[in-house]
Image: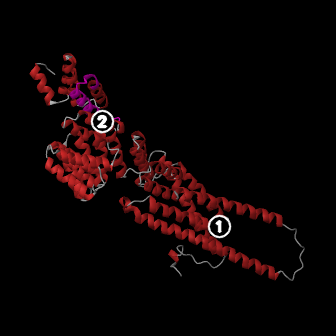
Amino acid sequence: MAFPKRYAWIWPSIVDTATAQNASKQGLWACTYCAGMTIVLVFLSLFDIQPVPNVKINMWDLLDVFLFIVIGWGIYKMNRIAAIAGLALYILERIYMWLYIYSPKHSSGMGIHFTLAIFLTLMFINSIRGIFAYHKFTRKSLTKNMLSNATQTVTKPKSNRGKAYYSKGIAIATVMVIVGIVFYIVYAKMGYKRYVDSGYAYYNKGDYERAMTDYNKAIELNPMVAEAYNNRGLVYNNKGAYDSAINDYNKAIELNPSLALAYNNRGYAYYNKGDYDQAITDYNKAIELNPSLAIAYNNRGYTYNNKGDYDQAINDCTKAIELNPKEAFAYSNRCLAYDNKGDYDQAINDCTKAIELNPTLDAPYNNRGHAYDNKRDYDRAMADYNKAIELNPSLAFAYNNRGLLYDNKRDYDGAINDYNKAIELNPSLAVAYNNRGSAYIDKGDYDQAIADCTKAIELNPKDAIAYINRGSAYSKKGDDNQAISNFRIAAQLGNSAAQKYLRYKGYQW
């Protein structure tokens, strides 16, 4: 195959040792380019400049620089193994980048990367061609010289066999070091993937310890992969280690600022910590990065529901359903918002749809039970709470809600037993302490009621109902000063019932 003279460098013609040497230099230039560009990127990273989207450069990339320098030196010395190692290292690096780094979001620059990769690959191939041809021509020339001198009388030269073996030993050792380093880098940069995949499989099975072990191994092999930190954050979140989860999500976002799921997951961790405003900020960012991410709308809606903004909660859950009509959680959460708005029939319809989509979910049964409870359909409410607990015996909210049902039926001992179980499962569940305090008031145990309401306030200082219940307990004990003090705080928090009571008693707040 012959190219026009101006393009002959693409596939140079090799006819003798001189042209072979010229062709081999392409590999040297390719190594120089790879090492030089990496040095520039590492230097820019020192100033927090990352010019290549989705690629985090740091000092560890200087290992690549070292390898390309060693390989370039081997090519300069016309070493065949070095030439092959150069092509192998470059191709493996490109495969790694295309499979695990570049994303569709940055596809606009893929054409340039692909074109450059073709040219550099050709340069390494030409280097291999040149070096192998050089050794071929050298052998032919040596054989020819030996034949022409065969009839001449020569003095037998002193044997240099030991020196030759020593040189070969050094060359073999150098090649083995290069190959070992190349394979280590490939293992470190690409071997992590199987640990990420197995960790995710263990996570879905609920085996969080083995999932954590695999994610730790993936990060050990390649500490520059955002996916591993994001997934490990999910494990921490499910174990209740919210600060550790947030740290991992922070690292994932640092490595990949466009990873919408990391913002969504960090938002959920902040939600679990009770920081609803920060959670919403993260959900907003996730939606900005990926407007089709249904789970972010669903989670934001759930957070708005807990802030008392039921209309916004319904809007977000509706958007999540529009994006993913089979998202059972979105129906369940919209059910909760409708229930809180007092639209119990619509709430029941949504939770029934969620159960139809996924009969194994506990939340829709729990939420529908609450709606039935509010409609005073206690039998259906009890059936739903029992089903939720059957599906998930660790669902503290279901025990809390069933306790409320017992409370409505004036079965205070049954209510307290369920509140005890809810608190055992989730010692940070403020509403369960408050509800148990209310049950103790109904039983006449005012000191225990005050203790429970105080704990509820400690966990959630903005819970006006807890102040009202504690005020009621003090009032029944005859301590009017403490009672008024608690009602005043509830009124300041915006509770209309407390405000009305204080007006009736002639007090300001």
Q: Quick check: is 111 in the magenta stretch? A: no
User: 458 or 147, which is in the foreground?
Assistant: 458
Residue under the image location 17 percent in, 26 percent down:
491
Gap between marks 2 and 1, in whole Å? 75 Å
Residue 97 x %, y %:
47, 60
Residue 354 x %, y %:
24, 55
In the rendered image, is residue 42 in sight?
yes
Task: Residue type at mark 2: give it.
Answer: Asn
In the rendered image, is residue 318 in sight?
no
Mark 2 surroundings: few (<14), some (14-19) or many (≥20) residues within 10 A: some
Residue stretch rendered in magenta on the structure:
427-448
Q: Secondary structure at mark 2?
A: helix
Mark 1 surroundings: few (<14), some (14-19) or many (≥20) residues within 10 A: many
Q: Is residue 501 left or right of residue 93?
A: left
User: 232 or 370, which is in the foreground?
Assistant: 370
Question: Which residue position holds label 1?
Answer: 81
Residue under the image location 28 percent in, 35 percent down:
432
Task: Residue type at mark 1: give it.
Answer: Ile
Q: Is residue 230 left or right of residue 218?
A: left
Residue under the image location 43 percent in, 56 percent down:
201
Q: Is residue 464 left or right of residue 200?
A: left
| Numbered label attached to residue 148 | none
Residue 68 x %, y %:
59, 59
User: 355 or 404, which is in the foreground?
Assistant: 404
Marks 2 and 1, the one that precedes in the sequence: 1
Quadrant assignment for the C terminus: top left
Question: Which residue position holds label 2?
Answer: 417
> Given this view, does label 2 or label 1 mark the residue nearer the observer?
2
Which secondary structure is most common in the magenta stretch? helix
Is mark 2 in CB contact (under 8 Å) with mark 1?
no
Q: Quick check: is 440 in the magenta stretch? A: yes
